[in-house]
Image (tube, coloured by chain):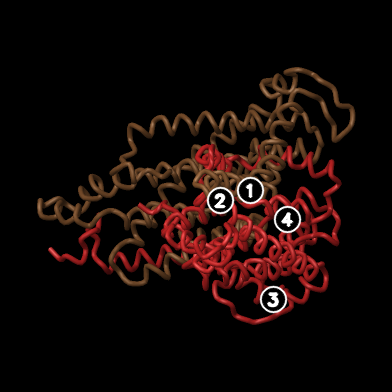
Chain colours: A red, B brown
Amino acid sequence: MSLNNRYDGFSWSKGFLYILLIVTVVFFLLPVYWVFIKAINGPIAIFKYPPDLFPKRFSLENFRNGFQNYDTMLGFFNTLKVVGINMAGTAIVSAIVAYGFARMDFPGRNVLFIIVIASILIPWDVKVIPQFMEFSYLGWTNTFLPLIVPMMFGFPFYIFVFRQFIIQIPYELDEAGIIDGCNRLGVFFRILLPLLKPPIMTVLVYEFVRSWNDFLDPLIYLSKMSKYTLSLSLFYMITPFQMDWGAVMAVSALAVLFPVLVFFFLQKYLFGGLSFSGLKG
Amino acid sequence: MSRYSIQAQEKVAGYLLILPWFLGFLFFYSGPMLFSFVISFCNWDYFKDLTFIGLDNYFKIFDPTGHAIPAMGRTLKFVILEVPLQLCVSLAAAILLTRKISGTRVSRTLIYLPAVMSGAVGGLIWRYMFNTQTGLFNYLLSFVGVGPIAWIENPDIALYSIVLTGIWAIGQPMILFIAAIQGVPKTYYEVAEVDGASKLRRFWHITLPMITPAILINTIIILIQQFQMLAPIIVITSGGPAKATYLYSYLEYESAFKFLKMGYASALSWFMFVVILIITLIIMKSSKKWVFYQSEKGKML
């Protein structure tokens, strides 16, 4: 028996495996492929039946309609603003909090860290209704504050990712810094931060995708058109009659393109996050 | 500097470093949740006429003629279908992607890809592909002589169509399963191979028991996610047709943000929280019987 198959479970021939792999990939790519094809195929192709499985013409008319007839550009820039602030803010705060959990010894630390982990699992519905009451009371509706401010206090999942990474860094490095006269924040910024590139990238990629794709929070808090984010302006392109599906597909393609690119080029950080988060066996 | 003062200093430094998280937890999690618990015993229509009504909101949830119990029934049906489906598909994909063949790395990326679509974009694409007359799904089915199916227009089918879209969102659990399968020590397979165990037996008796911790984690994460599944419902069906996809989370959403019944919505969300908590605890409790930990180190926390 060949040894190169040693951790296999089933005995399928390789040819069959390759066919299965290709069919699976095609199946999963279908929705993403379809939105890009329909976006560049022009408005005529939208309700053409039978549909062309492969693009027969190239036209940017859907994109023109999407940008001229709808506030897509504004939504795009609003999204960039929120995403940019969230990425920078939540990464640094989560890292500092994680440093506290990983390196300081104080009463109640373990209990508090269990609360951090438990709060990852708090269902969105349960916290969104009270948060909505709170933010409405503060007059934060129709501002980006409800999307940004909670992230500025650190995000439980990111704190977890940073903490798992920091506890694997030898404590001797911290001690060397303290002997050299650094205070705690000095140790963090001068010694640990340069070593935290992998988890920082993981958190930035996660936060980009999360923040970019956020749909329910903008839907609840933003009703002024000037504040729409990209996913919201996309949602309000839905109308019962005369809906411009071509424009919808073009804007959808744009909305999908950025996470897809980030994901494609930075996926090692997305998947790599697992290897140091302790979830890998 | 004395040893004691360094320890004291460390305590203070520790509390200061975690202070941002603690404040956030107070202001955005525990504080509002406590407030909503109080409000769930009140009638409160968007910041006016706050009146204490005792358990009335909860009685309203359990009123058999009301919306909440049928909605919870639909949600339970949805969760019971969706969780095993996503678990099986993600595990099958993970098994395929851990074979010793080339192209698995790029395939992993491509299979994950639809999971990075937002709820809004994903919902719109599904709506478009589910179109009865010109949609892609019915076109592809026409080759095998099936359909046309009224995916989201037929009340008997709509909920299953929403369940179906969940297949494309398995990126995250799949990655966890891949990591778990790759983490199984190779020596186990070598020993089993020497003993002449078939591949199926090796999967059943080595791989499956070894990845039970990943199965547990994925089950709980998917379960919690699917109970609150909302964005696709808003975009694809708005709870219709004929309330076929009017899930509990959609009832909560409408009560809170459309009808602004804050007291009732708070009660709804607390009932949901308790249901999720009980089911999660049952699964955790049962996990002692079926989850296999190699050592204490293998435990997640």
Which residue is located at x 30 percent, y 65 percent?
Answer: A17
Instruction: Estimate how packed mark 4 is, as few (under 14), some (14 to 19) or many (20 or more) residues with alpha carbons within 10 Å.
Output: some
Which residue is located at x 74 percent, y 31 percent?
Answer: B35
**Viewer-nearest of discs 4 and 2:** 2
**Viewer-nearest of discs 1 and 4:** 1
Instruction: Estimate how packed mark 1 is, as few (under 14), some (14 to 19) or many (20 or more) residues with alpha carbons within 10 Å.
Output: some
Could you tell me if the residues under marks 2 and 3 are in contact, i.e. CB atoms within 8 Å? Answer: no
Q: Along the horizontal axis of the image, is B51 left or right of A158?
A: right
Q: Which residue is mark 3?
A: A42
For badge 1, the amino acid type reads Leu
Whole-angstrom CA distance, mark 2 to mark 3, is: 55 Å
Could you tell me if the residues under marks 3 and 4 are in contact, i.e. CB atoms within 8 Å? Answer: no
Mark drawn on residue A100: 2
Could you tell me if the residues under marks 1 and 2 are in contact, i.e. CB atoms within 8 Å? Answer: yes
Whole-angstrom CA distance, mark 1 to mark 4, is: 22 Å
| Closer to the camera in the image, A270 or A89 | A89
Disc 1 chain ID: B
Q: Which residue is mark 4?
A: A148
Q: Earlier in the sequence, mark 2 or mark 3?
A: 3
Disc 4 chain ID: A
Mark drawn on residue B16: 1
Which residue sits furthest bottom?
A: A58
Instruction: Estimate how packed mark 2 is, as few (under 14), some (14 to 19) or many (20 or more) residues with alpha carbons within 10 Å.
Output: many
Relative image position of residue B138 (x, y in whole percent): 56, 58
Give the secondary structure at mark 1.
helix
